[in-house]
Image (cartoon, rainbow, N blue to C red):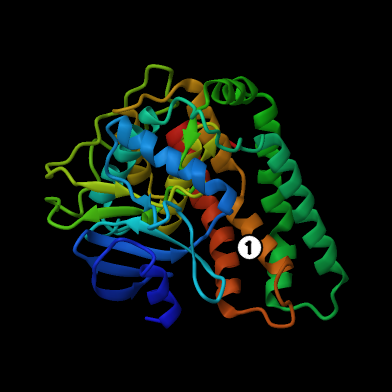
Amino acid sequence: MQEYELNVLDQYNIDVTGTRKTRGAILCDTRQGLLLLREVATSEKRIPALCNLYGYLKGQGYEWTDEILPNKNGEYVSTAEDGSKYILKQWYQGRECDIRKPAELLAASGNLAKLHTVMSHGLEQGAPAGTHLGEEYNRHNRELKKVRRFMRSLSPKGEFEFTFLKYFDQMYQWADLALEELEHSDYDALYQDSMERGCMTHGEYNYHNILILSGTYVHGETAQGGASGKSGTRGPDYKGHGGHTNREPLRITTTNFDKFKIDIQVEDLYYFLRKVMEKHGWKERLGDNMLNAYSAIRPLSSGETEYIKNRLIYPEKFWKIADSYYHSNKAWISVKSIEKLNVAIRQTEEKKRFLENIFSFHL
């Protein structure tokens, strides 16, 4: 541990007995429990609202979250000798949600539903509002066309550029279709209602930010839960097929709310589902059961189901890869970047089947 980091810990009323490095942070064993020290990853202006959110969640009975602790001066941000800014968080003994274990993914989906139920009302100390999805899609589409223009002007072109240009029209068709579907949906009403009620999202609900606490386990780790097969479009009263397995309840801690905002809450569910499906090759049974596990606790409305479908239509991964390419050093394209592009293109057919069988959507 660096000297300046020890200097930061000296600013707190804690007794440190040991430290060890973890993902982008330092775990601290203390007489006050396990704590985590890391550099400030968001705007300092957001810290008061973030602390307010943690207090609100605990006040509503949702206690299994991290929490920013004040230093000796009652401040939530501490400054190291080199000027770096740090926060100290309450932490827990556990591990990240294992994306290879469907039972844990179902438990995490149910946990998200509970979280959304608690976060369905706004805070007095406001959270930022999410961007209208139509604006986001239009911006992404412009960026995709800009990347294509740039690649067309290159001579010679590498494997990445050839592959991108070869499949651009096919992938852009999905982007254009997503915008068209959005414009003919009830999205505006859903978005406006979420803004007025102050519904909050986590903002980055993925397996890295879901901790399975030590001492909890599941029976039948390979179970994918519930009945499989077509579920069709979920209506306003849809509550899923159950999606239960014979398992012990997991204790889950949700961490890192830095990107929380006011928005349509099932954006979190879309994001979590997409990340998992990309890792699992868009396995329909698993995806269906994740939706079931969520809607068994917080039923999805027809508008929310339509929203998730629309978000899945948009070629998000393809856009992200293009955006990363455009803002990187293009003199050398890594093999990994080419692999990611090929996977995003290949999985489009798998996603197409997923949308057909789970959402009854046909291109």
Can the viewer see residue 233 in this picture?
A: yes
Quadrant in the picture for residue 235: top left
Residue at 34%, 50% in the rendered image: 66
Residue at 75%, 55% in the rendered image: 144
Taking depth in this image into account, of 345 and 295 the one nearest to the observer is 295
Task: Pinpoint residue 170: horizontal percent, then vertical percent.
Answer: 69, 52
**Image quadrant where one finds the C terminus:** top right
Residue at 41%, 82% in the rendered image: 3
- The residue that label 1 is drawn on is 321
Can the viewer see residue 270 in this picture?
A: no
Q: Is residue 129 left or right of residue 21?
A: right
**Image quadrant where one finds the N terminus:** bottom left
Identity of the amino acid at label 1?
Ile
Quadrant in the picture for residue 231: top left
Task: Pinpoint residue 174: horizontal percent, then vertical percent.
Answer: 66, 45
Category of crowding for the residue at label 1, using alpha-carbon neighbours closer than 10 angstroms: few (below 14), some (14–19), many (at least 20): some
Q: Is residue 321 left or right of residue 88?
A: right
Q: Can you say whether 197 is above or below 313 in the image?
A: above
Task: Pinpoint residue 168: horizontal percent, then vertical percent.
Answer: 72, 57
Q: Is residue 73 left or right of residue 315?
A: left
Q: Can you say whether 112 is above or below 236 in the image?
A: below
